[in-house]
Image: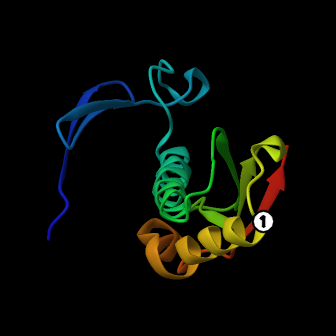
């Protein structure tokens, strides 16, 4: 299986990427010569991480018949000062509603399976920077 993306320069620092039939605008901040028409490339890596692991977790919890009604993730990363300015550490927080009555053991199992077995984005990013994760109940 192959994954392909086509990206076209639109001027200044704006690019339009064709991803699975969807257009995604990528741009720089005004301070960096862009017009802030879209997210920055490194932030998209974090969005890819949360989307990938989130899909895993929801799928696993559904198979466990857990009553998930609300689920969010937050991802943050430390960036190096020198070029190339890359992520030096990544933190991922899985958030669930306490009132959903989820079995905490199943939630932990779902998140662990995603991080250790299923999430390809996590596997890729872990090769570049330490990735820590935790679960919070809100």
Specify whether 40 is left or right of 81: left
Q: Nearer the viewer, residue 115 or 68?
A: 68
Judged from this view, the residue extending furthest toward the front is: 65
* Residue 59 in the image: above or below residue 114: above
Residue at 68% x, 76% y: name it.
130
Q: Residues within 10 Å of mark 1 (few under 14, many from 20)?
A: few
**Residue located 61% across and 56% down the image:** 66
Toward the viewer: 83 or 72?
Answer: 72
Given residues 42 and 3, the one toward you in this image is: 3
Report helix, strand or loop for mark 1: helix
Question: Please, is residue 37 above or below residue 134 in the view?
Answer: above
**How far across and how far down the image is residue 55, in percent?**
46, 54
Q: Please report the residue visible at 82 percent of the width from the left and 41 percent of the height from the top.
A: 99
The part of the image, by quadrant, that contains residue 91 is bottom right
Residue at the location (83% across, 46% down)? 98
Quadrant of the image containing the C terminus:
top right
Give the left or right position of residue 10, taking residue 136 as reference: left
- Residue behind mark 1: 104
Q: Which quadrant of the figure has residue 31?
A: top right
Please state if 115 lies on the left or on the right of 96 as rendered.
Answer: left
């Amino acid at each position: 299986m192959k994954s392909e993306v086509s990206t076209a320069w639109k001027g200044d620092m704006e690019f339009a990427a064709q991803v699975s039939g969807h257009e995604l605008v990528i741009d720089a901040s005004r301070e960096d010569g862009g017009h802030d028409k879209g997210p920055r490339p490194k932030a998209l890596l974090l969005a890819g991480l949360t989307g990938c692991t989130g899909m895993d977790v929801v799928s696993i919890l559904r198979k466990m018949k857990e009553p998930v009604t609300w689920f969010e993730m937050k991802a943050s990363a430390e960036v190096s000062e020198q070029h190339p300015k890359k992520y030096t550490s990544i933190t991922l927080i899985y958030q669930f509603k306490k009132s959903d009555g989820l079995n905490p053991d199943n939630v932990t199992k779902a998140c662990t399976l995603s991080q250790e077995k299923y999430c390809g984005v996590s596997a890729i990013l872990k090769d570049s920077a330490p990735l820590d994760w935790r679960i919070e109940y809100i």
